[in-house]
Image (spheres, rainbow, N blue to C red):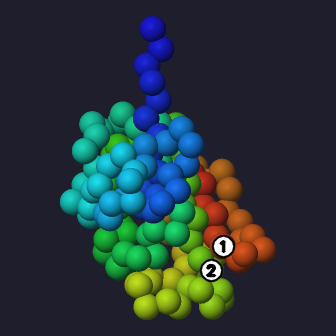
Amino acid sequence: MLKKQIKLDIGCGKNPRKGYLGIDIRDFGQEKILDIRKGLPYANNSVDEIYCSHFIEHLDQDSILNFLSECYAKLKKGGLLWIIVPHKDQKGAYVLEHKTFFNEYTFENIEKSGRWKRLELIKNERPDIHWKVLKV
């Protein structure tokens, strides 16, 4: 019997990704209402994929580092972490709710830790930054 994959869409808002468990701090009708700053309620090495689009910029830098450590702990070896954030040059990056700003160099030191293998780092036309990594 195949075990069902655990795929999380953290900070999903009103539109969780199809095939993912939607998680947000506010109730938008998604499956889980959860403040991830208090941790993720999953066993270590149990999650296949974590997707976050336009979420971590709402956290301060310490909370982002804690969140990335939590993702690392929860993901299986070879698990995918996909983060999308606004580029600092985008005027939408500077809304009042945003606490942290990103450019294409933001994640370099995290990658140099040797814990992640970069699959993709792009700045697209929006312009957003897409950072996709595998847990190694």
Q: Residues within 10 Å of mark 1 (few under 14, many from 20)?
A: many
Q: Are marks 1 and 2 in contact (CB under 8 Å)?
A: yes
Residue extending farthest to the top is: 1
Residue in the foreground of this view, choosing between 3 and 28: 28
Q: Give me the residue at 43% from left, 35% from top.
A: 6
Which residue position holds label 2? 87
Amino acid type indicated by mark 1: Asp
Give percent across and percent down for residue 95.
49, 89
Q: Nearer the viewer, residue 41 or 69?
A: 41
Tell me where residue 88 appears, x and y as whole percent: 60, 86
> On the picture, is 67 further left or further right than 135?
left
- Residue shown at 54%/38% (left/top)? 19
Q: Is residue 132 above or below residue 86?
A: above
Q: Which mark is residue 128?
A: 1
Q: Gap in Å between the C-alphas at discs 1 and 2?
A: 5 Å
Q: Is residue 90 left or right of residue 64?
A: right
Task: State the count of labels.
Answer: 2
Q: Residue furthest right?
A: 125
Q: What residue is at 56 percent from the left and 85 percent from the top? A: 93
Q: Is residue 135 above or below residue 33?
A: above
Residue 38 position, x and y percent, is 21, 60
Mark drawn on residue 46 = none
